[in-house]
Structures are given as C-alpha cells and as structure tokens.
Image (cartoon, rainbow, N blue to C red):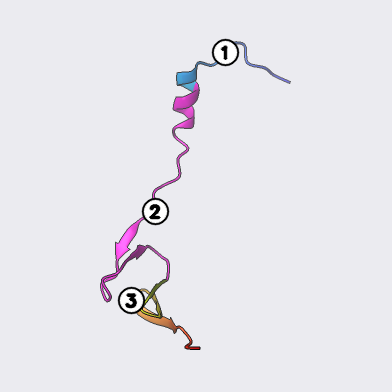
Amino acid sequence: MPNPKRKLSRSRRDSRRATYKAPSMTITKDPVTGEAHLMHRAYWLEGKLYYKGKVVMEKASA
C-alpha cells in the first residue's frame, strides 16, 4: 500500500478541500404569483401547489 513520502501542510490540504463545496441553491421569482421559491421546485401558496406558474393541486379541505 503506498504511503505519502512527506507530511502534507495544512494550507495545501485545506486549499484542495475548498474546491468541493455544494453549490448555492438558485432562488427565482414566479412571474404569475410573485412568490420567491427554489428553481425547478413546486411551492405552496394560499392552499394551492404551484409549479411553473400553474396550479398543480389544491389542498383538500377537511
């Protein structure tokens, strides 16, 4: 099993790890309702589920 010949410095180790960050989620504003939401996600507003500006489902009243 190969082993490192020299100790890796903290700055070199951390700079390598710094490139593996999760991308920030994109927030967009719906042109129909004006609600801010995550892109490519459905969202609830006033008892209705919206996706791409259209009502997909309404909450069942109990």
Q: Main secondary structure of the magenta part?
A: loop
Q: Tell me if residue 29 comes above or below residue 7 in the rendering.
A: below
Instruction: Judge whether residue 51 is colored magenta.
Output: no
Side of 6 relative to 18 (left or right): right
Which residue in the rendered view is the most extreme toward the right?
Answer: 1
x, y (%) of residue 58? 43, 84
Binning the other alpha carbons within 10 Å of mark 2 as few (below 14), some (14 to 19) or many (20 upward) gives few
User: Is the residue marked by circle 3 packed among few (<14), some (14-19), or many (20+) residues within 10 Å?
Assistant: some
Magenta stretch holds residue 24: yes
Mark closest to the chain's N terminus, 1 or 3:
1
Q: Amino acid at mark 3?
A: Gly
**First along the sequence among labels 2 and 3:** 2
Q: Residue at x 41, y 47 (%)?
A: 23
Residue at 47% x, 26% y is 14
Q: Which residue is mark 2?
A: 25
Residue 45, image x, y percentages: 36, 75
Residue depicted at 57% across the width and 13% down the height: 7
Q: Secondary structure at mark 2?
A: loop
In the image, what residue type sits under mark 2?
Met
Q: CA distance from mark 1 to mark 2?
A: 36 Å
Which comes before the other along the chain, label 1 or label 2?
Answer: 1
Query: Which type of secondary structure does the marked residue at label 3 adopt?
Result: loop
The residue tagged 1 is 7
The quarter of the displayed image where residue 27 is located? bottom left
Relative to 26, residue 60 above or below = below
Q: Gap in Å between the C-alphas at discs 2 and 3?
A: 19 Å
Residue corresponding to mark 3:
53
Q: Secondary structure at mark 1?
A: loop
The magenta region covers 13-42
Disc 1: CA contacts within 10 A as few (<14), some (14-19) or many (>=20): few
Q: Position of residue 61 (x, y in %)?
A: 47, 88
